[in-house]
């Protein structure tokens, strides 16, 4: 049924449709309305789940690890400082292989205070062993939560997943969302039946001390299963299309990339803006395209490497990590290592600043110029008030 | 036993439980319960992070599992009646 929903409500409804057993939450802007919607649905009896209001995000994640160990399908949501406070427990969740699914309404991390959208909170947690899915719109948020459970709980994966929705831009903006029926979702998502589980009749010790002689092998297993998750993600989407009739183009959606002179790699809601602008520029005979990065962990190296024939690759970074360019830029550059592409990092959309059609037009024009003239600078802070008047 | 990474369980798990880990040797101070002050409210049992406050039967006084109590003192701190004191181990 078509409903008009924010991404936050879409995420909460997805949790209900996924028949989540345990949700443990702590409120934080801009995620809070996910928690509120869950509380409302549990209180009214519409959703049959244990709802735990915790004293912190650290505790929320800890509670879910325990719940997952007894075989519960688990859910939480967070943003920003809340995600940062979870940091060490996020590594526990992946290290002991609990397939928790967590929407993140992506936001800045202070200071100074800024409650609005960017990807810094999520990018900071790229190394904790969680899968990271980036969504373009509210429909994709609902659909990706369902797909994330299917992938995360696959016995060959057993890793947690973040579903990223841009703070406010998606989290608080209503859009048309096709909400599937419970019967459809039940057909798509099998019950969660992990092995082994905590069993009072057969007590065992979970997540105890692993000595130096086996730690490397446990890390290798995670590395291997994270790589294997790429195929599971593609399969889960193929099956999703069969049941629900929608799909999103795999790990990287190639939008008008064939024969392009310049392609922008972009994740999140701005990928939609980029596609719209690419269409307009194509109408003017300018050959540009968009590679929408749907999954950042595991990183789709092969799909990015397949762009090696495109003369110029731009990378959109909605965060800055103070390294040799931004985080997404570096991953993309690494995947393209050895190819002849020109590549440039475009940093914008920080702290809730809009990524406008004009920004995107400027970026595509700049990329076409770089394709002709070569790279002028490694990192471009688009829209920076630098007094040059070039924006 | 495990030979390669392929043999490992998906999540680190052992058949041995913490029952077999005598963490009591870590202790510097031992909780001692004064049964004349204890009201059997079991607040200590509720707070003990190592499940070392044992209540055998309903209405029994709690006692300390000294094989596992690490001597953290949370029970003594939480006891509203001041019935638990922390006594230095002599050796």
Image: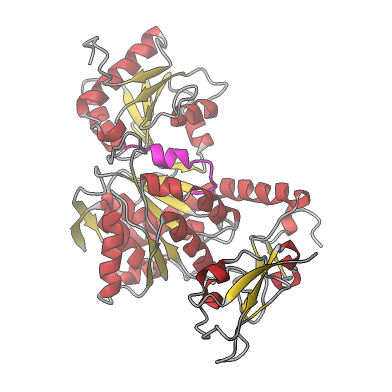
Q: Nearer the viewer, residue A13 or A102?
A: A102
Q: Is residue A293 visible?
A: no
Q: Nearer the viewer, residue A271 or A238?
A: A271
* Membership of A129 in magenta stretch: yes
- Magenta residues span A118-130
In which image quadrant can residue A16 be found?
bottom left
Query: Residue sitting at 76 percent across and 48 percent down?
Result: A212
Number of marks? 0
* Membership of A101 in magenta stretch: no
In the rendered structure, the answer to whether residue A212 lies left or right of residue A152 reads: right
Residue A277 image position (x, y, % from top left): 24, 29
Protein image colouring: secondary structure
Query: Residue sitting at 66 percent across and 48 percent down?
Result: A219
Judge whether A298 appears above or below A321 on screen.
Answer: below
Quarter of the image for the N terminus of chain B: give it: bottom right
Q: Is residue A150 visible?
A: yes
Query: Residue sitting at 41 percent across and 57 percent down?
Result: A56
Residue A118 image position (x, y, % from top left): 33, 37
Residue A143 image position (x, y, % from top left): 34, 55
Residue A8 image position (x, y, % from top left): 28, 54
Please name the predominant secondary structure of the magenta segment in the image: loop
Q: Nearer the viewer, residue A82 or A70?
A: A82
Judge whether A190 appears above or below A148 on screen.
Answer: below
In which image quadrant can residue A238 be found?
bottom left
Q: Nearer the viewer, residue A14 or A228?
A: A14
Quarter of the image for the C terminus of chain B: give it: bottom right
């Amino acid at each position: 049924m078509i409903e008009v929903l924010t991404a936050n409500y879409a995420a909460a409804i997805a949790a209900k449709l996924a028949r989540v057993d345990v949700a443990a939450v702590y409120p934080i802007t801009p995620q809070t309305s996910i928690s509120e919607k869950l509380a409302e649905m549990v209180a009214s009896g519409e959703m049959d789940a244990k709802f735990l209001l915790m004293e912190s995000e650290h505790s929320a994640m800890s509670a879910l690890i325990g719940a997952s160990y007894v075989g519960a399908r688990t859910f939480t949501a967070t943003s920003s400082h809340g995600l940062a406070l979870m940091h060490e427990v996020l590594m526990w969740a992946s290290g002991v292989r609990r397939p928790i699914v967590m929407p993140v309404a992506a936001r800045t991390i202070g200071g100074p205070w800024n409650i609005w959208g960017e990807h810094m909170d999520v990018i900071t947690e790229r190394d904790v062993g969680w899968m990271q899915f980036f969504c373009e719109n509210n429909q994709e948020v609902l659909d990706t939560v369902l797909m994330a459970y299917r992938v995360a709980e696959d016995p060959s994966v057993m890793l947690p997943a973040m579903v990223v929705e841009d703070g406010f831009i998606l989290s608080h903006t209503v859009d048309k969302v096709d909400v599937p029926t419970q019967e459809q979702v039940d057909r798509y998502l099998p019950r969660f039946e992990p092995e082994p589980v905590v069993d009072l009749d057969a007590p065992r010790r979970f997540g105890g001390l692993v000595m130096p002689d086996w730690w490397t092998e446990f890390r290798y297993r995670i590395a291997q299963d994270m790589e294997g998750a790429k195929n599971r993600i593609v399969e889960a989407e193929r099956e999703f299309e069969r049941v629900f009739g929608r799909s999103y183009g795999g790990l990287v959606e190639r939008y008008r990339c064939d024969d392009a002179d310049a392609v922008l790699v972009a994740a999140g809601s701005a990928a939609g803006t980029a596609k719209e602008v690419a269409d307009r520029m194509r109408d003017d005979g300018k050959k540009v395209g968009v590679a929408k990065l749907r999954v950042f962990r595991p990183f789709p190296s092969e799909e990015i490497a397949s762009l090696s024939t495109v003369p110029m690759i731009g990378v959109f970074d909605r965060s800055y990590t103070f390294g040799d360019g931004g985080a997404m830029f570096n991953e993309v550059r690494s995947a393209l290592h050895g190819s002849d592409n020109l590549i440039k990092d475009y940093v914008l959309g920080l702290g809730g600043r809009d990524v406008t059609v004009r920004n995107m037009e400027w970026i595509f024009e700049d990329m076409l110029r770089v394709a002709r003239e070569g790279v002028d600078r490694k990192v471009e802070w688009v829209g920076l008030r630098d007094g040059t008047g070039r924006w | 036993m495990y030979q390669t990474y392929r043999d490992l369980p998906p999540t680190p798990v052992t058949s041995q439980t913490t029952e077999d880990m005598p963490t009591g040797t870590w202790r510097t101070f031992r909780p001692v319960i004064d049964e004349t002050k204890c009201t059997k409210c079991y607040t200590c049992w509720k707070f003990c992070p190592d499940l070392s406050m044992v209540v055998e039967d309903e209405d029994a006084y709690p006692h300390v599992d000294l094989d596992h109590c690490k001597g953290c003192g949370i029970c003594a701190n939480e006891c509203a009646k001041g019935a638990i004191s922390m006594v230095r181990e002599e050796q």
